[in-house]
Amino acid sequence: MAGSEESARLAREWTAVTLSDGKVFRLGGTSGMGLGWAVDDDSAGKVVGMDGGAAASLRVSPARKLAVAVLTNLQSAGPEQLSAGVAGFFK
């Protein structure tokens, strides 16, 4: 896929969906859902990611050129908090 096509695809996937009434869908605060991605339009910059199986977390901050992946086989390890904490070191 060409660079501009890839950029356009990611922009669509990493944008919180707009509902039929014209409002942007939000889970709470600045957090919403893109196409298969959790999207946070935080004032410090967009963060996208996904958590799964209670044992994995991925956070991508395109503007900061930062990605943090946490994989564990322990469901109670809290990978979401760990990935957010690691990303915090790079602000």
Image (spheres, grey):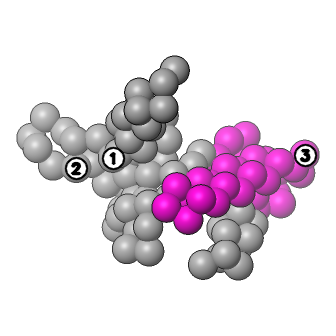
Label 1–label 2 contact, CB within 8 A: yes
Q: Residue 82: which numbered mark, if any?
A: none
Q: CA distance from mark 1 to mark 2?
A: 6 Å
Other-residue count near label 3 (Cα within 10 Å), few / some / many at <14 / 14–19 / ≥20: few
For residue 55, above or below residue 80: above
Magenta region, residue range: 51-80
Other-residue count near label 2 (Cα within 10 Å), few / some / many at <14 / 14–19 / ≥20: some
Assign a secondary structure to mark 1: loop
Q: Could you tell which of marks 3 and 2 lies nearer the N-terminus?
A: 2
For residue 77, above or below residue 18: below
Q: Could you tell which of marks 3 and 1 lies nearer the N-terminus?
A: 1
Residue at 42% in and 44% down: 14
Question: Which of the two residues, 46 or 32, is positioned nearer the viewer here?
Answer: 46
Residue under circle 2?
A: 24
Query: In the drawing, does residue 76 fall left or right of residue 65?
Result: right
Which residue type does callout 2 highlight? Val
Residue at 43% in and 37% down: 7
Is 69 colored magenta in this rendering? Answer: yes
Residue 61 seen from this side: yes
Residue at 70% in and 78% down: 89
Label 3–label 2 contact, CB within 8 A: no
